[in-house]
Every structure is written in C-alpha cells, then in structure tokens.
Amino acid sequence: MYLLRLFTGKYLNIIGGKKLLYIGLVLSFFVSLLFFPIENLNFLIFVRFVHGVVMGIALSVMQISVMNMIPVKRQGEGISYYSLSLILATAIGPFIGVFIMQLGNMSMIFIVCTLLSIICILLSLFVSIPKVEMTSEQRQEMREFKLKNFIEKRVLPITSMVGILSICYSGILSFLASYSMEIHLLSAASYFFIVYSVCILISRPFTGRILDSKGANIVMFPAFILFSAGLIILSQADHGITLLIAGALAGLGFGNLQSATQAIALKRAPSHRVGLATSTFWICYDLGIGIGPFLLGSLVPFLGYRNLYLTLALVVMACTCLYYFLHVKQKAFNKQITKVS
C-alpha cells in the first residue's frame, strides 16, 4: 500500500486520474472473482495481496481526485465530508459482513463484494475527475525519477507529526481488547469504536467549516487536548461509562486532528503537487498505524496498559508543542518575511 501511494501520487497527473481509476476498479472486479475457487491458504494470501494492491490504486486515485476537486478556501470542510464516507464504510462494512454470515456463508459475502465492484465501475462512468493543469516544465519535472517527485517535502513536517499521532492511536486500536479484558470491561469496549465513530460523524462537518473560516489553530489545539484527555481517562478507566467517555474524547480529538492536518498539508502544496501531498500524508499515517503496534507492544511488558496510555497522552501533548513550532510559528515567520520583501 505504501508503494502504491508513492507511485499513484506521482503518476496521477501524468497518466490521468480517470484511467487509473478504471484500472483499479476493473482489476478489483476480476480479482474478486478469484476468491470463489480458493481451496488453500497460500492462494488466499496471494489473492488478498493482489486485491489490496488494485484496491489501493482505486482508493488512492479517489482520495487524490477528491482533494483536487475541493476549492482551496473550503478544503477543511471538503476533507471533513469526504472522510465521513470512510468512517461510515468501516462502520457499516463489518456489520453487513456479520449479517450476511448469519444468513448465508462466505460465498455470499464474495458475491456481494463482486456485485459492489460492478456498481463501483458503473458509478465511475459518471464521475468527472478534473485534470490538473501543468506547464510543460512541471510535467517534465514530474516524469523524472527523483525522490522529490514521490514525496512532497513541503508537507513533511506536518505529516511526520501525523505519523506520531497515528502511532498513539494505534495503541487504542491494537490493545483496547486486551486492556478491557484485564480491567473486566470487555462488554463496554465493544461499543468504544461506535461512540468514537459517532463523535467523528457529528463533529467533522462543523470543525471543517471552522477551520476554513477561523483558521486551523482553533481546531487543532482543542483536538490535541481532547485526544490527550481521552488517553488519560482511558488509562484510569474502571467503569464502562468511563471507557466510553474516553472513546468520545478520542473521536473528537484524533478524529478531527486527522482531517485538520490533512487540510493543512494540502494548503501548503502547489496545485500540481496536491496528489503528492495527499499520498505523503497517507504514507505517514499508514506507517504510524503499521509500526505502532510493534513499537508499543514492546513497551507493554515494562509499562503495562495503564502506564502505556498515560505515556501516549504525554506524547500527544508533546505533539502540541511540535505543531506550534512546525506550523504556527513558521507561518508567522513566513508572513513576516513576506511583509519585509
């Protein structure tokens, strides 16, 4: 997935978003057909890998294309609305899967997924993906096989911070079940991510508009505090209600940090490099989610779950200071330089 984001961000404007989207969706349909004859684990792993690759192409193209469609002045609001579709999909998808399993079997799930692939292909026929205008020099530069044409360095400071925050969130994703068993709150933990998702669904449309009209700081600083508070309360949870309050604060905190930092990153990139900025953001986010369980898992035997979440709360507060120096102070410095020049 990381490699796909690298290459999709680079070649989207060269090959064309519409072509890449068709390629991803059509290949996804054919790969979904391969799930039916599976008879051994090795072939299943191979098919799942290929399916992830082609889905990664389609998903990356859609993410980048949506970012290109959003007016600069409404990027916060646009990203908030678009990201809600991902939240709904991850919430509704598992529910539908369990429901189908209760009525049928795995073959029914494969049939439904194949039909959904066909629907996506048909819907893509009506999608208009804007073509990013590039000068001949910019197009020639993007064709060069250089690191700067795979990563947008202007957004690396803010996206690196996103990577750290996603490591903190991975601590909830990976260890909440084990932690809730340890403190005997497993039944309450089953509702944690429902509360988390609902708080994101309610808050993001408002925070997106506020970000566009009032600036990023009015969203970012409260979100840092809420996420840190959620981790602290989670570390001290001894009742189901306490655990769910932590889920609500995490949704209001990390859920809005994710969309707000993406809007900040896109505002820093030139229009012809929005695709690279988007892919750079998601690479850092995915890396944090991917390596987080490994890094944090090595600390659990020494710290325990409660102290681990307290430590992560301190890391989030440290990211608040990092954000101040990487964005707030730097932005003020750039304005001062502009006035002088």
Image: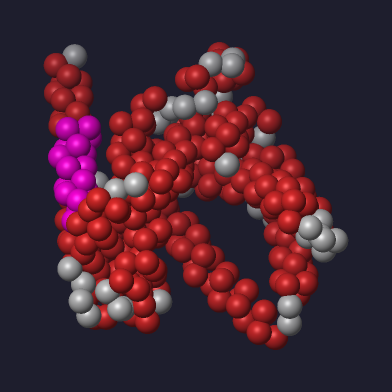
- x, y percent for residue 136: 59, 16
Residue displayed at 17% across by 68% down: 236
Residue 222 visible, this orientation = no
Q: Nearer the viewer, residue 196 or 44?
A: 44
Q: Main secondary structure of the magenta part?
A: helix
Q: Nearer the viewer, residue 65 or 312?
A: 312
Describe residue 266's horizontal placement relative to residue 90 as left or right.
left
Q: Which residues are magenta?
A: 310-327
Question: Hey, which quadrant is residue 36 in on the image?
Answer: bottom right
Q: Quadrant of the C terminus?
A: top left
Describe residue 46's horizontal placement relative to residue 198 as left or right.
right
Residue 312 in magenta stretch? yes
Question: Hey, which quadrant is residue 246 in on the image?
Answer: bottom left
- x, y percent for residue 175: 37, 61
Residue 266 in magenta stretch? no
- x, y percent for residue 284: 42, 39
- x, y percent for residue 298: 34, 47
Describe residue 58's horizontal placement relative to residue 289 as left or right.
right
Residue 7 visible, this orientation = yes
